[in-house]
Structure formats: C-alpha cells, structure tokens
Amino acid sequence: MGRFDGKVAVVTGSGRRKGLGEAIAKTLATEGARVVISDIGASRDAATPGGMIGATGEMAAIAAELPGASTCVCDVRDPDQVRALAAHAVKTHGGLDIWVNNAGIGYIMKPLMDVTPDDWRAVIDV
C-alpha cells in the first residue's frame, strides 16, 4: 500500500529524462498514484537551443515505465491547455487529486546581462 493509492496526479514539466519532474512522477507512481506526464512537447519560442523538440517521445517513454500513466502535452502559459490537461486527467483516470506545478525553463543558460526581456518574460510566464 502506497500513500497515494487510488490518487491521480498531474506533474507539469515531467517529460524530460533526468529532470525533476520525471523524478517527482516516478516517486508518486511508486507510492501508488496514477500519473499524467505532461510537458510542452515542442517549444513555442523561436530561439530554444537544446529546447524541447522531440519531447513527446520522451514523455511516452517515461509514461510507459509507470503503471497506469498517461501523457498530455501542455504549455502551462496557455490557460486553455491547462484546463485541457485537467480534463485529460479526469477523463482518462476518473479524477484529479494532486497537481504538481513543476514546469520551468532551463534552456536560457547565459549570463544575466545577456538575458533579453523576452527571455525573462518566458521564464516568468512558465
């Protein structure tokens, strides 16, 4: 028996290997939760070196390792997509008990003085 048996959890930003979101999702699944692996899928930003291209394949691979897990692409900057993510959890798993706001931007790795206002806005929006 796990602490989260019968619970449904959404973890945003959980679709990348070796990321914090993946670790959170795996821990929740180990404790009995059915997890929705969610990530942006492919970056909507123009300049994303090392960004999220191809992340949907990673999402599927992570979900395949977790009993009863599903995937749902979601850009957390878009309220309609966030609502659709919640609806996916309810429709696919019958409810929604846990929501982990883990999504973040890690691809803007440059000196602070080189960060543009658009870069910073993207970080804050996520």
Image (cartoon, rainbow, N blue to C red):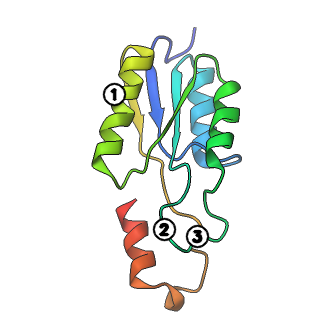
- Residue at 35% over, 31% down: 86
Position of residue 55 relative to residue 35, above or below, is below
Return the residue at label 1.
87
Task: Tell whether label 2 touches label 3 (CB within 8 Å).
Answer: yes
6 or 58, nearer to the observer: 58
Q: Amino acid at mark 1?
A: Ala
Question: As drawn, which residue projects farthest toward the top?
Answer: 1
Position of residue 117 relative to residue 45, above or below, is below
Residue 124 position in % (x across, y down): 37, 67
Q: CA distance from mark 3 to mark 1?
A: 29 Å
Quadrant where the N terminus is found in the figure: top right
79 or 120, nearer to the observer: 79
Q: CA distance from mark 3 to mark 2?
A: 6 Å
Return the residue at label 2.
45
- Residue at 44% over, 16% down: 93
Q: Could you say whether the residue bearing mark 2 is in a helix, strand or loop?
A: loop
Return the residue at label 3.
48
Q: Could you say whether the residue bearing mark 3 is in a helix, strand or loop?
A: loop
- Residue at 45% over, 27% down: 9
- Residue at 52% over, 26% down: 35
Q: Is residue 17 left or right of residue 40?
A: right
Q: CA distance from mark 1 to mark 2?
A: 25 Å
